[in-house]
Amino acid sequence: MTHDSDILIVGGGLSGPILALALAQTGHSVTVIDALGEKVRKNAGFDGRSYAVALTSQRLLDGIGLWDSIADHSQPMLEIKVSDGRAGEGPSPFFMHFNHAEIEEGPMGYMVQDRHIRRTLLDAMAATKNITHLAGETVTAQDIAPGSATATLASGKTLTGKVLIGADGRGSGTATRAGIKRTGWGYGQTALVCAIAHEKPHNGIAHQFFMPPGPLAILPLPGNVSSIVWSETDDNAQRFNALPDADYLTMLRPRFGDFLGDISLAGHRYTYPLSLSLAQNLISDRLALIGDAAHGVHPIAGQGLNAGMRDIAALAEVITDATRRGEDIGSLAVLKRYEEWRRFDNTALAMATDGFNRLFSNDNSLVRGLRDIGMGVVNALPGLRRSFIREAAGLTGDLPRLMQGQRL
């Protein structure tokens, strides 16, 4: 059977293009169907939206030839400090401090702005002959037949491939059209996201400050700039986001503290509601889901992107190995290997982030006391502390080859 491409990928954000590049480098032909126009993605200015790229995710990006274009725009995360408290009162004396020097592999991860990753992906796709990037196109229907998956576009064009990949986010139309249901719930929290310029250097230290309404993450970017992800109750977030910039900063300062000196806004402000969303299946006939289309978790540990990166590395390895064995890459037997590899890890991460959020986003005095003692115990035990550091770096579990620094 003749196909337009071996693999059709729906979604042109981050996960779709990264998977496309990984597969294209092993000889597969790939079509990426991107709802946004190329100019919109490529011409984005600085807006503060950034990602914590774990060490193993950096290895993946390096393994497919992207990291050299991103490295100069990245900020290594050398330390992570985790504390608990209330706005304006300062942190509890019990805390956790993780230092990359306690592991041999290097920084736990890197902070990279969204715009730099996207531009690198667009340039790389344009330079790769066996990738077709269809920008400004949406899928309106899909059909599965023996040996083939078909996507119908809003323009009326139809495309066929051996397998269809949904990389189209939490509201994945690919999953919906395949009849894949989702499990999840809202947290009654909204994340306020922006970049903050500050007087003093951050020294590559990331901070996570847990407060009763939700956590505040302060994540280092190049220069004296940090990205913040500030989780608040829905009502508070709506009220704070409606404030002028000066008043917004007035609300932020007691939570942010003065350890970095005076602060000011750098770029735009964003909000997004926080929820848990898990696809009940990662695969269907000739179809697989990756990234947020497969799992959307609370940003409390900054691991959402990195879980998606593990999906990408695992699926690319499964498909590449199946091709080398002469198997049908869209068959359920092949795709089940991917689902079995990723199902437990994705569910465990979702439950862990859900549990941490429920544990820390409350003001019960007994719970506060127990969790503060728990943080003190972790911080006092080098072996346990090192385990947390390795988890943050993505070094635990059954790692795909790309995340071990190997080639496909």
Image (tube, helix red, strand yellow):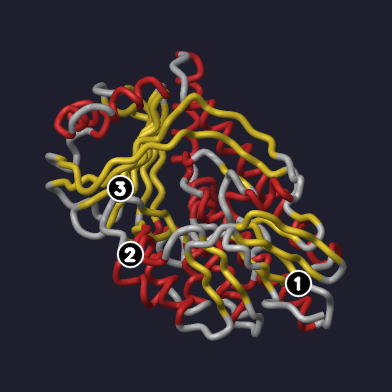
Circle 3 is placed at which residue position? 227
Q: Residue furthest top?
A: 365
Q: Which of the two discs, 1 and 3, labels the residue nearer the N terminus?
A: 1
Residue at the image point whose x is 54% and y is 52% from the top: 391
Front-most of residues 131 and 96? 131
The image shows residue 90 at horizontal and vertical percentages of 27, 26
Establish if 72 lies above or below 388: below
Q: Is residue 106 visible?
A: yes
The image shows residue 185 at horizontal and vertical percentages of 61, 29
Amino acid residing under circle 1: Lys
CA distance for labels 1 and 3: 40 Å
Residue 28 left/right relative to 284: left
Residue at the image point whose x is 29% and y is 50% from the top: 48
Residue at the image point whose x is 57% and y is 62% from the top: 155
Residue at the image point whose x is 45% and y is 27% from the top: 189
Circle 2 is placed at which residue position? 74
Amino acid residing under circle 2: Ser
CA distance for labels 2 and 1: 36 Å
What number is the disc on residue 162?
1
- Label 2 neighbour load within 10 Å: few <14, some 14-19, many 20+: many
Q: Which of the two discs, 3 and 2, labels the residue nearer the N terminus?
A: 2
The image shows residue 148 at horizontal and vertical percentages of 80, 69
- Which label lies toward us, 1 or 3? 1
Give the position of the N terminus as an image quadrant.
bottom right
Count of picture labels = 3
Establish if 59 lies above or below 193: below
Residue 81 left/right relative to 34: left
Front-most of residues 210 and 299? 299
Q: SS for tag 3?
A: strand
- Which label lies toward us, 2 or 1? 1
Q: SS for tag 2?
A: strand
